[in-house]
């Protein structure tokens, strides 16, 4: 299997060659040269597999340059009941992504797929845990090392740290805005005592952290000398790890492979639902892929109108589902590449226009950049959005009707999913975080605290390990260099 850049760069690297990287050299994103196909017969054979074996079957179609035995060992090391153990009462951790029927009426069925039972209680663990093991494996093969530099306002940073802690050849330097994360998120990250994890609390806001990471990335000499890498959501291996749970969800919700299901996905950077698109392109019988956004509705707007309009910072809202607060969707280019019939010259021109003019218009209206919006429906996409008031209402509704507490992002998903139910097609909502992570809003909705999984009761009281530093790229570069010893 070879990979191509959405912007047409001539090189066609292998899975291992793009594993540790981010963007293609021309600024595009990597996709497989063609999507591997899964037949109905093969799907039926996969029905009884464990999650780890299913992950192996899906991944081996993409990671063709990793020996089968090694890949199987990696998926079994990653997808274990003792890692994804934070399940609700009555759920089985061995399922890794357990399904729960929420409602069933008049042939319409709504099901929740739990993706947030890993160490940081959010779905990013599903991919990041595999990435940690893949990175360690690849680095050991080449006797190399990697120093991950990242900026986080919460979920990504903690998922990365829990995936990379204790890994040979890897260090993590994670910048976060000093005193701006929730007490729970701060405790999750700062209580890690592993010597390869460095928490840097920057005196500034999240954008300052991100600017420092950009400044370091633009210093190519330093980046090469210090072996700096990232783990952001455009990483191809993260996307492909997410493809697996769409197969698992489908197989667990159906009894035969002539049935169709739909998925609703709380979306921000379009990484999660992009994996659903890839599963569908591989032949998984998905009727609809429903994008759920919050007030930051850049994706909902595109899927309603065909207009992609990046938001300015002043139009980007801080909401109670903060992991979906985006101004542009960094994985969206992957879908647009398929939508435009894989015409990389047009993709390159349109995303250049995103940088220079703030967006593009595929609505087909006079003066627009194309009419591909009319084909969106063939790819199964639909969308919807929710507000803070909707989230409060849905959290209360879920407690009353389903007897469970859901987090704010999952509430966005449930609200939008219920608007897209169809008779005869099971709708699966992806649960992207557990409520304990967003307790402030649970309190507001329910007047009580969210339940915490065992082991998280006193997390804020654990000793914390972090450095407070000024928002000064030069100082932070020195700090990193002093700890890599390179
Ligand atoms: C990251 C995240 C999302 C958004 O996922 P994308 O892949 O960026 O679309 C949604 N919910 C939670 C809880 C997240 O952490």
Image (tube, grey):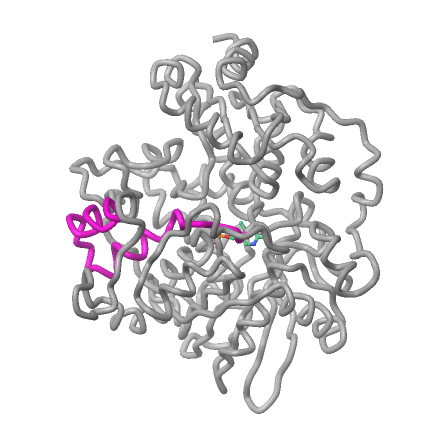
Q: Name the quadrant of the N terminus.
A: top left
Residue at point 48%, 70% (across, down): 384
Tell me: residue 150, above or below residue 419. Answer: above
Tell me: residue 440, above or below residue 182. Answer: below
Extreme residue in the front direction: 314
Tell me: residue 486, above or below residue 102. Answer: above
Residue 431 percent location from the top left of the image: 60, 60
Image side of residue 436 versus residue 390, left or right: right
Q: In the image, is residue 348 part of the stretch drawn in magenta?
A: yes
Q: In the image, is residue 170 part of the stretch drawn in magenta?
A: no
Residue 364 percent location from the top left of the image: 20, 69
Image side of residue 303 versus residue 474, left or right: left
Tell me: residue 297, above or below residue 75. Answer: below
Residue 226 percent location from the top left of the image: 44, 15
Q: Quadrant of residue 97?
A: bottom right
Nearest the viewer among 360 and 227 is: 360
Residue 234 percent location from the top left of the image: 40, 43
Residue at point 83%, 63% (across, down): 447
- Inspect this view and state whether residue 165 appears: yes
Number of marks in the rendered image: 0
Nearest the viewer among 58 and 392 is: 392
Image side of residue 373 versus residue 215, left or right: left
- Inspect this view and state whether residue 56 appears: no
Nearest the viewer among 292 and 75 is: 292
Extreme residue in the bottom direction: 106
Q: In which quarter of the image is residue 376?
A: bottom left
In magenta, the rendered stretch is 324-353
Residue at point 30%, 53% (across, down): 359
For the stretch drawn in magenta, what is the main secondary structure? Answer: helix
């Amino acid at each position: 299997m070879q990979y191509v850049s959405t912007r047409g760069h001539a090189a066609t690297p292998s899975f291992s060659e793009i594993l540790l990287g981010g963007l293609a050299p021309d600024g595009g994103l990597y996709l497989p040269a063609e999507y591997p196909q899964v037949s109905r017969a093969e799907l039926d054979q996969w029905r009884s597999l464990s999650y780890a074996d299913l992950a192996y079957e899906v991944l081996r179609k993409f990671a063709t340059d990793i020996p089968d035995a090694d890949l199987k060992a990696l998926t079994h090391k990653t997808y274990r009941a003792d890692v994804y153990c934070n399940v609700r009462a009555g759920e089985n951790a061995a399922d890794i992504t357990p399904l729960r029927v929420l409602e069933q009426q008049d042939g319409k069925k709504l099901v929740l797929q739990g993706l947030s039972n890993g160490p940081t209680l959010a779905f990013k663990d599903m991919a990041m845990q595999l990435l940690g093991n893949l990175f360690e494996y690849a680095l050991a093969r080449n006797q190399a090392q990697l120093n991950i530099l990242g900026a986080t306002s919460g979920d990504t940073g903690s998922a990365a740290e829990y995936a990379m802690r204790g890994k040979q050849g890897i260090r993590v330097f994670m910048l976060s805005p000093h005193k701006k994360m929730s007490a729970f998120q701060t405790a999750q990250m700062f209580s890690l005592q592993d010597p390869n994890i460095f928490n840097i609390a920057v005196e500034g806001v999240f954008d300052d952290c991100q600017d420092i990471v950009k400044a370091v990335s633009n210093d190519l000499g330093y980046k090469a000398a210090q072996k700096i890498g990232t783990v952001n959501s455009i990483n191809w291996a993260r996307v492909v790890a997410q493809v697996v749970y769409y197969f698992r969800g489908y197989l667990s919700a159906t009894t035969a492979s002539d049935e169709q299901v739909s998925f609703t996905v709380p979306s921000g950077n379009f990484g999660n639902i992009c994996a659903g698109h890839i599963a569908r392109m591989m032949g998984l019988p998905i009727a609809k892929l429903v994008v759920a956004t919050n007030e930051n509705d850049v994706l909902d707007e595109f899927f309603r109108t065909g207009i992609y309009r990046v938001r300015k910072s002043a139009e980007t809202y801080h909401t109670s589902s903060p992991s979906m607060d985006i101004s542009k969707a960094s994985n969206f280019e992957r879908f647009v590449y398929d939508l435009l019939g894989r015409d990389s010259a047009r993709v390159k021109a349109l995303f250049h226009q995103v940088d220079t003019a703030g967006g593009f218009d595929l609505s087909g209206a006079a003066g627009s950049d194309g009419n591909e919006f009319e084909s969106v429906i063939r790819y199964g996409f639909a969308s919807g959005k929710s507000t803070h008031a909707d989230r409060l209402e849905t959290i209360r509704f879920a407690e009353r009707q389903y007897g469970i507490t859901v987090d704010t992002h999952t509430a966005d998903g449930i609200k939008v999913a219920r608007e897209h139910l169809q008779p005869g097609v099971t709708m699966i909502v992806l649960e992207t975080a557990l409520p304990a992570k967003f307790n402030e809003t649970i309190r507001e909705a329910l007047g009580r605290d969210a339940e915490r999984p065992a082991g998280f009761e006193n997390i804020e009281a654990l000793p914390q390990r972090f450095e407070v530093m000024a928002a000064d790229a030069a100082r932070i570069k020195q700090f990193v260099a002093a700890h890599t010893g390179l």
